[in-house]
Image (cartoon, rainbow, N blue to C red):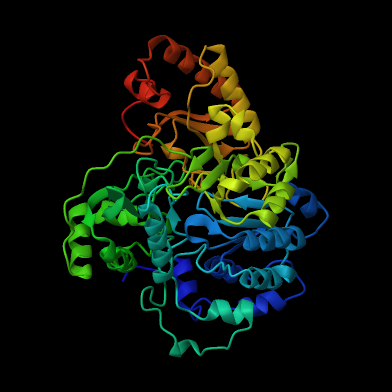
Amino acid sequence: MTELSHVEKIKRESRHLRGTLVESLQDAHTGAIREDDTVLIKFHGSYQQDDRDIRDERRKQKLEPAYSFMIRTRLPGGVCTPQQWLQLDEIARRYANGTLRVTTRQAFQFHGVIKTELKATMQALNAALIDTIAACGDVNRNVLASANPVETRAHPVVYDWAKKLSAHLLPKTNAYHEIWLDGAKVVSTEETEPLYGDTYLPRKFKAAIVVPPVNDVDVFAHDLGFIAIIENGELQGFNLTVGGGMGATHGDAETHPRLADVVGFLKPEQLLAVAEAVLTAQRDFGNRAVRKRARLKYTIEDRGLDWFVAEITRRQGFALEPARPFEFTQQGDRFGWVEGFDGRWHLTVRIEAGRIADNELGARMTGLREIAKVHRGDFRLTPNQNLTIANVDPAAKTFINALAARYGLNRHETATPVARDALACVALPTCGLAMAEAERYLPRLTRLVDEQLAKNGLAGSPLVLRITGCPNGCARPYLAEIALVGKAPGRYNLFLGGDGRGQRLNTLHLENVDEPTIVAALDAAFARYARERTPGERFGDFARRAGLVGTQAA
């Protein structure tokens, strides 16, 4: 029998994710929790972190690291009410670092929560009718859905399927309610996990539902995806995608990003059965010995796509129909006001790196609090770290627009395409995996890229730019036209060649380079692009056609 990884043993012995979390939380001698519990708390929607900016100084003072916790919500499709927004705002100011962060999975993250306030924070979230179950860990995570599900009558139906999918794939353990909400204790031997079993999945599992033509969820980056097929405004069903994933490890050829495959078409009422078949196949055949090879993409790679399709067909009890035609025209979000099918309006605003705060960019934390006090619609987080103030009554549109302008929530109107569409992960100082800056470097990076575009007569050109502090790919860098992936402090791998639609991986252009080298490389590439591009040709397509990068994807 293959030796299980250390994490698999922790899960197996955890009594359905309980471990010794209660004892860890009660230990007043440290701001940390026990080592094994750092694995289990992820399933509850939290990561233990420390402030790496002051780690060395604290070590010199013989102090333990400045431990705190990141908490991530489960929010299918990224939708919340104004009342929930006000409650989240209060939680951020009372328990966290005074900011809200919108993630690339349409969820909120709270940073800087100390151990003694973890439970109170979880209970406050529950009071807002929001939980963090399965927001992290080796389970299905927050389900993405196209961010503005009101453009046709089919869009709300698609969003409802995202909610159903999230609920269907939730773990059934009572541990979350016991530990955080003082729920009644259950003897773990009486408890079962019908979908996950005692050891859950081999690795994280990500699902998304998208409505063409805007690929705002980057559907091919996920383990499981559903592409909505809409005809005459009515949902006909979904094309199924399987086996996408962004993560990789520097210097390890056995790990790499992968685009999902389109494997067939299904009717709406078949969605849950198909999702369950895909998830349980990965549960049973995923690699539990080597975690870096444990994602569904490697299961498919090792066993073959035909084998996987046959396996899910056996499990769901019916064959998929042939995939139906679809077309994507762009990644990212459409900013500004959009009118829905029912005459209500939706304002999508730019949130740089997803960080909602009162800072030099504007009092946006305050502004959104004020909007939430008067808004009668809802808020929708986008998978691109932005925010839609949705379902605005026509009579309230002017007032909401004025509030947005007053508090600096109209930067999409003046921002360049590069600055408006760029993504960044959190990276330093809190992420323990970060090798280089990302969120804090993003403003400088977008300025440098814009300067090189302008220098070459390309100001205002659309461009998908993304940066991550490590190769795990939380900001989906391998689908960008230009991407920086952290290698060491101040040094990055430079990737070029995404297609602007999220349907092609980019390619490594330069490895382990510093800022001057990156700027010089982009200057040279943009100079050629300005001279040799064809009408309407995007930079990523040009980079591929002109041989700036090879045909071998990242």
Residue 147 vs residue 320: left or right? right
Residue 242 vs residue 36: left or right? left
| Residue 283 sits in quarter | bottom left
| Residue 551 sits in quarter | top left
Q: Is residue 208 above or below residue 509?
A: below
Residue 186 vs residue 320: left or right? right
- Quadrant holding the N terminus: bottom left
Residue 271 in sight here: yes
Of the pair 177 and 187, the residue shown nearer to us: 177
Q: Name the residue furthest top.
A: 531
Of the pair 529 and 151, the residue shown nearer to us: 151
Q: Position of residue 281 (x, y in %)?
A: 28, 66
Residue 492 vs residue 300: left or right? right
Q: Name the residue furthest front.
A: 395
Q: Position of residue 406 (x, y in %)?
A: 73, 39
| Residue 446 sits in quarter | top right
Q: Is residue 293 above or below residue 220?
A: below
Q: Name the residue furthest right.
A: 61
Residue 18 in sight here: no
Q: Position of residue 407 (x, y in %)?
A: 72, 41
- Quadrant holding the C terminus: top left
Q: Position of residue 542 (x, y in %)?
A: 37, 21
In the image, what residue occupies the spot 18% across and 68% down? 314
Query: What is the total number of numbered labels drawn onto the structure image?
Result: 0
